[in-house]
Image: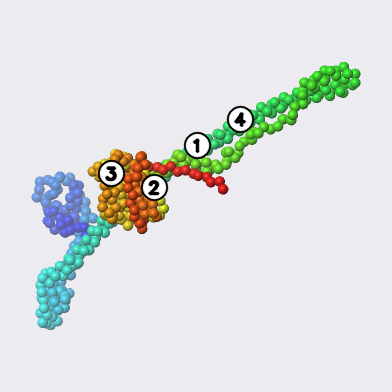
């Protein structure tokens, strides 16, 4: 009922609340008696509102509208009864200031209200209405704020679902690549094992064939000589020379030995297997010293899949989460540093305006990030260094920078900038850092360059 006014529930013909409403094929409704009366005065049966002709002889009732009208009338009757005096059934027209209650004219003249002060109802209601209105305004403002926050929360919930599905796809792609790499590495190592097995098995087969021929020849010589010996002395004397010659043709060589390297080199295939695979993998997988946090990126920045690059694009509809940087083309590193030494290279390319540096954690969600920013910048063709406490320092950089190397010594209190292409120092800030510092970049297109990692094995 809160969404229906009396005007919505009035018949277009009689302008009163519907009584026994019926509905036409054009979806307009009327009181049944009003419609029939209208039709009696017209040559054709047409809708009183849209003039569309109706061929119906049976007028279906609009039960939903009938129920709404009955509920409205009941509520209106209840409101009307509230305007009557419960003692005299007269309309309440006055307000007793002493008793602080509405009364009728009969109540005013009764003994109960002798010498009381009265005001007309509308006049007495002015001040309470004003106070209630003033009290209501903050509630309306609060309601508006809550509705806005709810809308943001709903958008954030939708974005969480989008992020989860996107991240899931990226994880699956990364592991699919790793699985493929490991499968290819497994196949290569098994192929090497099988090739070694094949070569060494063929080698053993050749040696066994040679030994088999030697054994057969020696066996023939032994058997023939033994036959001569069994034939008797006369036969031995007759065949002696031939027998001796036959035996001498088979000289007694040294016993054959198994050559070295005949066995499978198991240690070569299994020794440090996991380490060797990982060591090979690290040369194929880039390592970034700084991972960009997309939750801090401005809505115009589009991150790469590996979160090492950002480029400007069409503004996205992103949640207004507290971590997000206010400058549209700014982004923070996902990890802050509160100890140790750290270094990373930023590719600034041909961009004509940019900031690179570190931002204090306490200013991550502040509107003016420059209040907690130590940075090197390029603006209007001039390079400068800026910090929260000191003035801008313009720097005499001769060649346009394509890359900038940042080196943060948190414990030593130094932040240095250099050109890695020419190995030239640009500027160094000295400051006693007391809180976590996050890499900060404000640029239309950039890339965190990968860092080579190595493994050093110490033999104790």
| Residue 230, placed above or below residue 56 | above
Q: Nearer the viewer, mark 3 or mark 1?
A: 3
Q: Residue at x 18, y 70 (%)?
A: 82
Q: Nearer the viewer, mark 1 or mark 2?
A: 2
Q: Is residue 89 left or right of residue 446?
A: left
Question: Which residue is labeled 2 in the image?
Answer: 343
> In front: 428, or 134?
428
Q: Earlier in the sequence, mark 2 or mark 4?
A: 4
- Dividing the image into 4 quarters, which one contains the N terminus? bottom left
Q: Earlier in the sequence, mark 1 or mark 4?
A: 1
Question: Which residue is labeled 1 in the image?
Answer: 184
Q: Residue at x 14, y 70 (%)?
A: 127
Q: Tell me, yes or no, if residue 324 can be seen here.
A: no
Q: What is the spatial separation of the Cα atoms under label 1 and label 4, in whole angstroms?
A: 22 Å
Q: What is the spatial separation of the Cα atoms under label 3 and label 1, in whole angstroms?
A: 52 Å
Question: Which residue is labeled 4 in the image?
Answer: 199
Q: Earlier in the sequence, mark 3 or mark 1?
A: 1
Q: Residue at x 23, y 43 (%)?
A: 380
| Residue 275, placed above or below residue 218 | below
> In front: 424, or 372?
424
Q: Nearer the viewer, mark 1 or mark 4?
A: 4
Q: Earlier in the sequence, mark 3 or mark 4?
A: 4
Q: Are marks 3 and 1 in contact (CB under 8 Å)?
A: no
The image position of residue 460, as x and y in percent, is 56, 48
Q: Quadrant of residue 201?
A: top right
Q: Nearer the viewer, mark 3 or mark 2?
A: 3
Q: Quadrant of residue 214?
A: top right
Q: Residue at x 40, y 49 (%)?
A: 342
Residue furthest out toward the right: 233
């Amino acid at each position: 009922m809160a969404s229906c006014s009396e005007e919505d529930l009035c018949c277009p013909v009689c302008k009163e609340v519907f009584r026994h409403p019926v509905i036409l094929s054009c979806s307009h409704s009327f009181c049944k008696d009003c419609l029939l009366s209208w039709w009696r005065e017209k040559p054709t049966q047409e809708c009183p509102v849209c003039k569309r002709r109706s061929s119906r002889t049976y007028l279906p009732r609009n039960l939903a509208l009938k129920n709404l009208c009955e509920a409205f009338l009941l509520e209106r009757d209840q409101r009307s009864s509230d305007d009557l005096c419960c003692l005299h059934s007269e309309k309440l027209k006055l307000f007793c200031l002493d008793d602080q209650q509405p009364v009728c004219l009969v109540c005013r003249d009764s003994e109960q209200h002798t010498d009381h002060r009265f005001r007309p109802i509308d006049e007495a209601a002015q001040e309470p209405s004003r106070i209630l209105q003033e009290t209501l305004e903050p509630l309306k403002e609060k309601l508006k704020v809550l509705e806005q926050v709810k809308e943001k929360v709903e958008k954030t919930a939708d974005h969480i679902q989008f992020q989860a599905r996107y991240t899931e796809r990226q994880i699956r792609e990364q592991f699919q690549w790793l699985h493929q790499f490991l499968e290819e590495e497994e196949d290569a190592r098994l192929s090497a094992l099988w090739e070694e097995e094949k070569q060494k098995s063929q080698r053993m087969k050749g040696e066994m064939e040679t030994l088999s021929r030697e054994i057969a020849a020696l066996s023939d010589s032994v058997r023939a000589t033994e036959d001569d010996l069994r034939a008797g002395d006369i036969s031995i004397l007759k065949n002696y020379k031939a027998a001796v010659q036959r035996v001498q043709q088979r000289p007694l060589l040294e016993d054959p030995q198994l050559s070295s390297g005949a066995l499978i080199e198991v240690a070569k295939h299994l020794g440090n297997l996991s380490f060797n695979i990982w060591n090979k993998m690290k040369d194929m997988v880039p390592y970034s010293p700084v991972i960009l946090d997309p939750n801090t990126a401005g809505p115009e920045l589009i991150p790469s899949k590996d979160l090492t690059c950002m480029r400007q694009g069409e503004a996205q509809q992103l949640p207004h989460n507290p971590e997000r940087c206010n400058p549209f083309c700014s982004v923070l590193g996902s990890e802050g540093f509160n100890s140790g030494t750290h270094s990373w290279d930023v590719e600034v390319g041909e961009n004509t305006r940019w900031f690179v540096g570190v931002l204090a954690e306490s200013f991550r969600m502040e509107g003016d990030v420059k209040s907690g920013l130590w940075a090197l910048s390029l603006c209007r063709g001039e390079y400068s260094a800026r910090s929260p406490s000191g003035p801008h320092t313009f720097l005499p950089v001769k060649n346009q920078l394509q890359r900038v190397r940042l080196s943060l010594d948190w414990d030593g209190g130094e932040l240095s900038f250099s050109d890695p292409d020419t190995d030239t120092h640009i500027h160094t800030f000295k400051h006693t850092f007391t809180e976590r510092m996050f890499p900060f970049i404000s640029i239309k297109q950039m890339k965190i360059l990968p860092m080579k990692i190595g493994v050093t094995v110490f033999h104790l």
